[in-house]
Image (spheres, grey):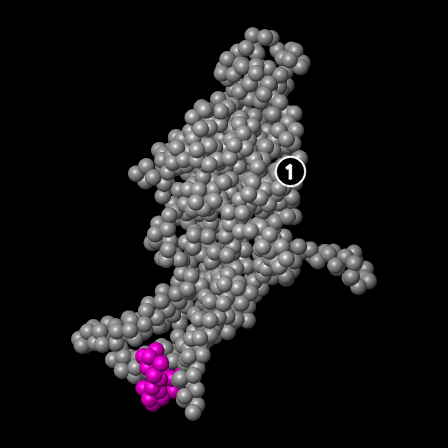
Amino acid sequence: MTDSVLFIAFPYVAVVVAVAGGVYRYFADRFSYSSMSSQFLENRMLFWGSVPFHYGIVIILLGHIMGGLFPYYSNFLIVNVFHMYTLELGGIALGLLTNFGVILLIIRRLVYPKLVPETTLMDWVILLVLLAQVLSGSYIAHFYRWGAVWYPYSPVPWLKSLAHLDPQIDFITPLPWIIRFHALNAFVIVGLIPFTRLVHIFTAPVTYIWRPLQVVIWNKKAAR
Amino acid sequence: MNIRSQVSAVFHLDKCIGCHTCSIACKNIWTGRKGTEYMWWNNVETKPGVGYPCLWEDQKKYRGGWKERNGKPELIMHNRASALANIFFNPFLPRLDDYYEPWTYRYGDLFGAAEGDDQPVARPVSAITGKEMEIEAGPNWDDDLSGSPIYAANDPNFASLNEEERKQFFALESMVFFYLPRICNHCINPGCLAACPAGAIYKRGEDGIVLVSQEKCRAWRMCITGCPYKKTYYNWSAGKSEKCIFCYPRQETGQAPACFHSCVGRIRYLGVLLYDADRIESAAGSPAGSIARKQLELILDPFDGEVIKEAKAQGIPDAVIEYAQKSPVYKFVKAWNIALPLHPEFRTLPMLFYVPSLLPVMAHAKGNLHEVGHDFFGSPDNARIPIRYFAALLSEGNEEAIRAIYRKLVAVRVYRRARTVGNIPEARVNKALDEAGTNPDEIEAIYRLTSLPSVEDRFVIPPFMREAAIEEVTDPLNKRESEGAGFTRKPKRGW
């Protein structure tokens, strides 16, 4: 029963909250969509925190998503032991980088008084949840070796079954508690998106690659 | 020809008395909110000096503005890919300390302090942390501090001056300064706009005012670096960039912007210019040394029949063309050629122009006596501020451009003195007019608009016609019985 709630109901609730909440917030309070950068108030420690954290988490997240979307394709990467070592080593290194970053980001908000009025309760919540996620991730990578090998065969089928609306929790429940925690905490983060500054992920400015550099807006749209 | 109209301005530096009334008028209206305390959309700087934020003109430090590559402008700070690569940390972002930590005073203590032996004082408290602080800098911390080895000596414009010219600023007898009031230039080729990854900044087509959409801004904070004048600011509380909006709500109702309206020295002129948008890129990418000239070439003659015909064909309202003809800015910038853009080498094509000040008549030492201006206003080359200083500020180092303006400004004074005091021989007057390439009619016009202008002469605000424009977008009455007009939610920090 608990498992069904945790591994079936909760992920669905989190995703629904994220999508509905995010869309609602976008249309009801677009002004609040912001990365809420605090670099202006403190930028030395931010460099050592933000850059490793963001680059680490983006690549790791992409790894999780690619491994989930193309589980069998990732076999290519692990048939060769040398490739597998490289992949795992890279993953562990990025994980450590991410840990380093998020810990600095937390310390930064504790030691710089100028950041206090800028920090909301939800900033603290999301920082702690992220810390739990990257710490548990690194722990798993280190103590449950060769995640690239087992990840496509246990958590991925569970995620897939959720996506197909045919939840099968047998893939996830037998795993060690820390892996189950990591999976659940991931959905906690998803559910928190619309209530935090994490919404900035979905307004990542990729359009800058192609948008015209100068923007002129006319009242009379048809005029030019 | 792609004709656009732009509300633009001229600041006459000779008339600025450095009273900061403009800054206060602006602050009272626009930047009293949390997170904006440190912002001065309008500020007045003492030159020579380091300015606000500290050393803003030094683009080696801040990387604002554009550079030229193959005849095209390119942002100095980033290209499209490196903008995204630097999104987690902008390496060239000025910090709060480059401006100053804003503060207020605990005035309540003056009244509420417990009875004691000492007079209560109002201690300064940070507007950011709310804690007591030591005041170490302010928005005009180097006010009047010409000759200061800390502030004036670090003025980036000194780079082009020789040792002797520099010394002139620091000797007690020849020490000199003037004021440089600054607002957003509402550039034709804005660096802030081009730098914004989210595409939140835009230029209004009808009047050229550059604005930050508060709903689209995501605090990627690139605009602050992109603007070489450091006239976009980051609201650390709301997580949004903000900038001078040229008081468009005032202008739309026929009022001059607050800083213009409150100007005690009446140094500010406002009017509309027509320009050719097709040539923006080539002007912004023109070779160093010709940028200011190319920019002035963009500005079209509103009396030219071809221009009028083309403007009408392109939908520019008749009233705007009429106001372009009456524009005092057109007179200063194009008809009389006595105003130049600030730091044209930044290549943003700023639409705010400055008349350089003809600084105090230099006293020449003669034995024990100092003789003042033996040739009435002397030669510009003996001016107390070296020509080269103004050339660094307004003309990419082109001294002849400054000299030409000085000759005309001197001619106005010589001519008017001959008319009013009458102690200048006619031959000297004619020589001054010839050298300046001007005539009595032009001189009288410059004199009138400089010395005796009425409010209507200074602020020729074109009709914005928003009452018609809004109907293109929405029915102006449809919110009458619900929210009312405008942005009705409180822009508070949320989530």
Three-letter residue code for mark 1: His
In the image, the segment drawn in magenta is: A159-181
Q: Residue at x 54, y 47 (%)?
A: B470
Instruction: From the viewer's side, name the closer residue of B450 and B274.
Output: B274
Identify the chain of the residue marked 1, using the numbered disc in the image: B
Residue in the image at 73% along x and 56% along y: B107
Quarter of the figure that contains the C terminus of chain A: top left
Q: Which residue in the rendered view is the most extreme toward the bottom?
A: A1
Q: Residues within 10 Å of mark 1 (few under 14, many from 20)?
A: some
Q: Is residue B123 left or right of residue A151?
A: right
**Label 1 secondary element:** helix
Q: Is residue B10 magenta?
A: no
For the N terminus of chain A, give its image quadrant: bottom left
Q: Position of residue B446 (x, y in %)?
A: 58, 22
Give me the residue at 61% from left, 26% from top. Answer: B450
Q: Is residue B248 above or below residue A28?
A: above
> Where is B385 relative to A22, above or below?
above
**Coordinates of residue B301 in the picture (x, y in percent):** 47, 26
Residue B424 position within the rendered picture, expressed as x and y whole percent measured from the top left: 62, 11
Residue that carries the numbered disc 1 in the rendered image: B261
Hey, which quadrant is residue A68 in on the image? Answer: bottom left
Quarter of the view holding residue B440: top right
Frontmost residue, B435 versus B372: B435
Q: Nearer the viewer, residue B466 or A114?
A: B466
Residue at the (34%, 86%) spot, across then down: A168
Q: Position of residue B246 (x, y in %)?
A: 56, 43
- State whether residue B10 appears in this view: no
Count how many numbered circles sit on residues in the image.
1
Residue B179's place in the image compared with B40, above or below, is above
